[in-house]
Image (cartoon, rainbow, N blue to C red):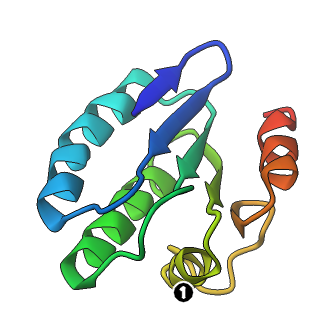
């Protein structure tokens, strides 16, 4: 997890096997990273390339992290980048707001599309 204040980008990277405990631990760092945004506009990148599909409680916990991000003051969009269609579909089905405009919450397998989303002016 990293917050780049110049790019106004909160980056979260998960790969391989992630347990509910891992996501809970990530939650603490996520809270601190959101505080670093100081309410200023920011985007989030959830990089899930090389992640195996999540199970049960880990899905729920990650969805809660995404929700905290979306509801945080200054949130200006999130892209979820995956390289597995299964992981992408899982994330699509757990979007924070069903029917969310892809201009705000994008799930993609395309790295160029993710970069384009993040490169837009805030």
* In the image: residue 51, left or right of residue 76: left
Instruction: From the top left corner, tell me how far across and down residue 29 is, in percent.
Output: 25, 35
Q: Badge 1, how many Cα within 10 Å: few under 14, some, many 20+?
A: some
Instruction: From the top left corner, tell me how far across and down residue 117 is, in percent.
Output: 82, 48
Whether residue 38 is visible here, answered yes or no, is: no
- Front residue of this view, candidates 34 and 1: 1
Residue 7 image-quadrant placement = top right
* In the image: residue 57, left or right of residue 33: left
* In the image: residue 29, left or right of residue 97: left
Residue 68 image-quadrant placement = bottom left
- Front residue of this view, candidates 16 and 61: 16
Instruction: From the top left corner, tell me how far across and down residue 88 is, in percent.
Output: 61, 75
- Residue at the spot 61% in from the left edge and 72% down from the top edge: 84
| Residue at the far top in the pictured view | 6
* In the image: residue 119, left or right of residue 86: right
Residue 105 image-quadrant placement = bottom right
Q: Element at badge 1?
A: helix
- Count of all numbered marks drawn on residues in the image: 1
Determine whether 111 is above or below 90 in the image: above
| Residue at the far left in the pictured view | 21
Whether residue 49 is visible here, answered yes or no, is: yes
- Residue at the spot 56% in from the left edge and 16% down from the top edge: 5
- Residue at the spot 62% in from the left edge and 62% down from the top edge: 82
Determine whether 41 is above or below 26 in the image: above
Quadrant housing the N terminus: top left
- Front residue of this view, candidates 13 and 17: 17
Q: Give the labeled residue for mark 1.
A: 93
Instruction: From the top left corner, tell me how far across and down residue 80 is, in percent.
Output: 61, 59
Quadrant housing the C terminus: top right
Determine whether 122 is above or below 70 in the image: above
């Amino acid at each position: 997890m990293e917050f780049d204040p110049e790019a106004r980008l909160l980056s979260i990277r998960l790969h391989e096997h992630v347990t509910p405990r891992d996501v809970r631990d990530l939650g603490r760092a996520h809270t601190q990273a959101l505080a670093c945004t100081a309410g200023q506009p920011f985007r989030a990148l959830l990089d899930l390339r090389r992640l195996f599909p999540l199970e049960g409680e880990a899905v729920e916990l990650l969805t809660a992290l995404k929700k905290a991000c979306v509801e945080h003051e200054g949130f200006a969009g999130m892209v979820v980048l995956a390289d597995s269609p299964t992981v992408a579909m899982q994330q699509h089905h757990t979007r924070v707001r069903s029917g969310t405009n892809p201009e705000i919450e994008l799930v993609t397998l395309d790295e160029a599309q993710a970069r384009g989303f993040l490169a837009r002016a805030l």
